[in-house]
């Protein structure tokens, strides 16, 4: 399925933020979005160069990361996926943390909380598991509706895209007696030679989770 850059993200904004969103080019949206997480891109440049990784951010409404949090009592939950299939990204942790905006670790989780109010799941960077544990409710659902957006680092001229239903599959564990389900995401970067398949499991221990 062909993916088209999302061009109507302004519909999520209101008031002054709606006007501001319509004035941004896709490149500006991409820059502001990734700048909300990183103060330096050395880590991204290294994993892309050395591991041919395709890092991307995902959350229900990525535009909120550059339009601002309208509900300060509820941090903006997102996940950073390295797109590294070698597993070697786990050896880059020191460089990774040195490239982030001011933050603190969330105890007993694989999440960090930024001073800006963004909470980021970094389990993939820390452990590179085959099944990445995330808060599915916050990451893939907008209320009761399955709806999410994502942004590849390499899509510098692309605004966050909607996660199309056709690229999502809910699959039951193949382990006998295991009743757990997990999500398979099949994504494609604009300039990528092939698709990226990501497996997400539901982890409901987030301190900031809404369940």
Image (spheres, rainbow, N blue to C red):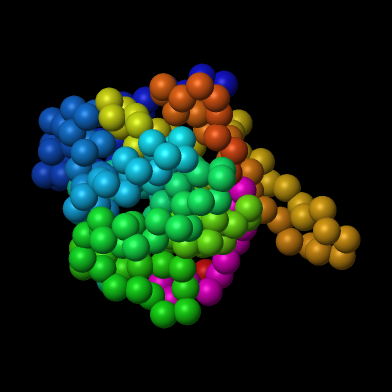
**Pick the front one: 180 or 15:** 180
Write the residue at 73% across / 61% down. Answer: 180
Which quadrant of the view contains residue 74?
Answer: bottom left
- Horizontal arrangement in the rendering, residue 179 relative to residue 44 (left or right): right
**Measured from the top left, where is residue 87 in percent x and y?**
55, 51
- Residue 142 visible from this viewpoint: no
Quadrant where the image shows the N terminus: top right
**Measured from the top left, where is residue 150 in percent x and y?**
41, 40
Write the residue at 59% across / 52% down. Answer: 200
Q: What range is drawn magenta here? A: 199-208
**Measured from the top left, where is residue 128 in percent x and y?**
54, 56
- Horizontal arrangement in the rendering, residue 85 relative to residue 4 (left or right): right
| Residue 95 lies in the magenta-colored region | no
Image vertical order of residue 103 relative to residue 65, above or below: below
Write the residue at 45% across / 58% down. Answer: 91
**Measured from the top left, where is residue 199 in percent x and y?**
61, 48
Write the residue at 63% across / 53% down. Answer: 130
**Pick the front one: 196 or 4:** 196
Residue occupying the far bottom of the picture: 107
- Horizontal arrangement in the rendering, residue 163 relative to residue 47 (left or right): right
Image vertical order of residue 159 relative to residue 141, above or below: above
| Residue 207 lies in the magenta-colored region | yes
Image vertical order of residue 151 relative to residue 190, above or below: below
């Amino acid at each position: 399925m062909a993916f088209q850059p999302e061009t109507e993200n302004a519909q999520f904004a209101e008031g002054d933020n709606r006007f501001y969103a319509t004035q941004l080019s896709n490149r500006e949206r991409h820059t502001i979005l990734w700048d909300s997480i990183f103060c330096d891109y050395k880590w991204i440049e290294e994993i892309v160069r050395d591991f041919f990784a395709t890092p991307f951010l995902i959350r229900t409404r990525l535009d909120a990361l550059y339009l601002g949090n309208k509900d300060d009592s509820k941090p903006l939950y997102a996940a950073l996926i390295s797109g590294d299939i070698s597993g070697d990204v786990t050896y880059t942790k020191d460089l990774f943390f040195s490239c982030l905006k001011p933050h603190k670790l969330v105890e007993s989780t694989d999440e960090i909380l930024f001073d800006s109010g963004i909470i980021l799941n970094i389990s993939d960077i820390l452990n590179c598991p085959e099944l990445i544990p995330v808060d599915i409710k916050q990451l893939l659902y907008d209320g009761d509706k399955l709806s999410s957006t994502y942004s590849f680092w390499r899509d510098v001229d692309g605004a966050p895209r909607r996660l199309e239903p056709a690229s999502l599959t809910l699959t039951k564990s193949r382990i006998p007696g295991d009743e757990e389900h997990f999500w398979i995401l099949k994504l494609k970067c604009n300039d990528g030679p092939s698709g990226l398949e990501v497996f997400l499991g539901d982890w409901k221990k987030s301190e900031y989770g809404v369940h």
